[in-house]
């Protein structure tokens, strides 16, 4: 839908006024320390998952059955197979 130059400029002025009048709500701010802890935890979890996949791969190559792997990772053998078989192949 075509708009006139005046309408575009008026809209731009409205947006600029809203931007200039904006006051952030302090309750919306994230605690930097908590964010850093979360990022570190996510990184550690990712590394741990990579190590676990490597360990499952080694276990399968050594002939360990899925039932034994499942008991080590805290699941059933079938659940372990479903979760890791594509990753270790």
Image (spheres, rainbow, N blue to C red):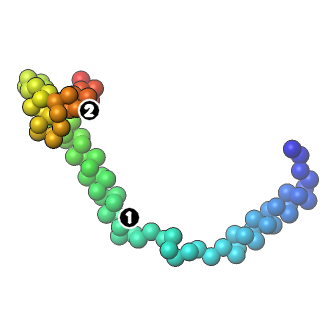
Vertical side of 80 occupied by 28: above or below: below
Find residue 81 and report its horizontal and vertical position in percent: 21, 28
Q: Nearer the viewer, residue 34 or 72?
A: 72
- Left or right: residue 49 versus residue 74 is right
Q: Residue 83: which quarter of the image?
A: top left
Tell me the tag on residue 83. 2
Q: Residue 85: in sight, yes or no?
A: yes
Find residue 19 and report its horizontal and vertical position in percent: 69, 69
Q: Residue 71: which quarter of the image?
A: top left
The residue at 58%/74% (across/down) is: 24
- Left or right: residue 47 versus residue 39 is left
Image quadrant for the C terminus?
Answer: top left
Find residue 8 and report its horizontal and vertical position in percent: 85, 57
Crowding near the residue tagged with mark 2, few <14, some 14–19, many ≥20 C-alpha atoms within 10 Å: few
The residue at 52%/76% (across/down) is: 26
- Left or right: residue 29 versus residue 49 is right
Find residue 33 and report its horizontal and vertical position in percent: 35, 70
Image quadrant for the N terminus?
Answer: top right
Q: Secondary structure at mark 2?
A: helix
Q: Secondary structure at mark 1?
A: helix
Inter-mark Cα distance, 1 to 2:
29 Å
Crowding near the residue tagged with mark 1, few <14, some 14–19, many ≥20 C-alpha atoms within 10 Å: few
Q: Residue 88: which quarter of the image?
A: top left
The residue at 66%/73% (across/down) is: 22
Residue underneath mark 1: 35
Task: Evaluate if marks 1 and 2 touch, with contact meaning CB atoms under 8 Å apart.
Answer: no
Vertical side of 76 occupied by 32: above or below: below
The residue at 56%/74% (across/down) is: 25
């Amino acid at each position: 839908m075509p708009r006139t130059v005046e309408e575009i400029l008026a809209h731009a002025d409205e947006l600029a006024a809203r931007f200039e009048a904006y006051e952030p709500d302090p309750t919306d701010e994230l605690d930097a320390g908590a964010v850093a802890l979360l990022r570190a935890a996510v990184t550690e979890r990712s590394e741990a998952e990579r190590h676990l996949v490597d360990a499952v791969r080694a276990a399968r190559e050594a002939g360990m059955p899925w039932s034994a792997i499942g008991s080590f990772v805290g699941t059933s053998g079938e659940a372990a197979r479903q979760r890791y078989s594509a990753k270790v192949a």
